[in-house]
Image (cartoon, grey):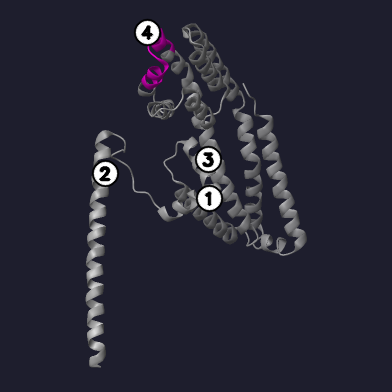
Amino acid sequence: MDDFALPTLGATLLTCVFAVMGVHVYATGKAQRQAVVDRLSTTGRIPTVGRRRRFRGVDRRMRQTRYGKKLDNRLAATGLDLTVGEFTAYTSFLAAGLWFLGSSALASFFGPIAGLLGIWAAFAFLNWQRGRRNEKFVNQLPELSRILANATEAGLALRTALSMAADELEAPAGEELGKVADKLSVGHAIDDALAELTDRLPSRELVVLVTTLVLSNRAGGTVVGSLRNLTVTLEERKETRREVRTQLSQVNMTAFAVPLLGLGALLLMDQVMPGSLDKMTSSPLGQGAVIIALGLYALGFFLIRRMSKIDV
């Protein structure tokens, strides 16, 4: 026993020394990181306020994949304060909850269908939020064109005019132009920065405005007259889009009412005849009929939305 006492004591002391060194290195690194964050926050390169991010491990793993990078671009276009990991986790919780709700409220066969519906609803919400933000940005384009025209007429450079517009306009135009101004400040070309803007928020109006700015920047000369005429055109298109959207509001509501009527019919059937859905989905013939019915409802929704989509 005495032969093992000395090596054990030595190993214990060595472990304690390594532990103290590890704690010291960790504390030093944490202090240095905080000092860097404080210095950058003072210069404005890192925002001083922000919420604590959740699911950081999931977010780190998702960003390393191609799907995670595409999803990150989609989230950036929506303007939502969500990371890839948070969106993935929340979508998984939603799908699991709808799976359980569909299985318990209807029948076990409807559980996977409800889960897939939850995933589709999450991505449909992203598309809706992106379209809503894009629509709001398009409505701000006349004011943006007016600001650029006034700044150009006053003799300011295009880079300065874009920075001034980013400060004066509200979100989302202010945020997007702020990104463009940040890229220009670190040496990016105007063509590349504006091209990335059109990729994030695609629209015909923005393409026309960006093309006008890029051509004037390349060829030189005055662009005030073009921007003045473009402002009037954008105002007219804004009013036209508003009228078309008002006329098609009833058709869009019909598209959502059709599948809701089918879901209401299923719930009513289960309430009138308890257990009927379990009996119907217990056979392959009943399952096939349910799948065909759901497919027809989805086809009706798609066709109505397609017919009511008018590009102005």
- The mark that comes first in sequence, 1 or 4, is 1
Which residue matches tag 1?
65
Residue 150 counted in the magenta span: yes
Q: Which residues are magenta?
A: 149-165
Secondary-structure class at tag 4: loop
Q: Are marks 4 and 3 in contact (CB under 8 Å)?
A: no
Mark 1, other Cα within 10 Å: few <14 / some 14–19 / many ≥20:
few
Secondary-structure class at tag 3: helix
* Residue depicted at x 51% and y 36%: 129
Which residue matches tag 4?
154
- Residue type of the residue flagged with mark 1: Thr
Find the distance from the CA under tag 2 to the CA under tag 3.
Answer: 35 Å
Find the distance from the CA under tag 4 to the CA under tag 2.
Answer: 40 Å
- Residue type of the residue flagged with mark 2: Val
- The mark that comes first in sequence, 2 or 3, is 2
Q: Are marks 1 and 4 in contact (CB under 8 Å)?
A: no
Q: Are marks 4 and 2 in contact (CB under 8 Å)?
A: no
Mark 2, other Cα within 10 Å: few <14 / some 14–19 / many ≥20:
few
Which residue matches tag 3?
126
- The mark that comes first in sequence, 1 or 3, is 1
Q: Is residue 70 above or below residue 148?
A: below
Q: Is residue 14 above or below residue 89?
A: below
Residue 156: numbered disc? none
Residue 29 counted in the magenta span: no
Find the distance from the CA under tag 1 to the CA under tag 2.
Answer: 29 Å
Q: Is residue 2 above or below residue 126?
A: below
Q: Residue furthest bottom?
A: 1
* Residue depicted at x 51% and y 15%: 218
Which residue matches tag 2?
36
Q: With 218 as the anchor, is 154 left or right in this view?
A: left
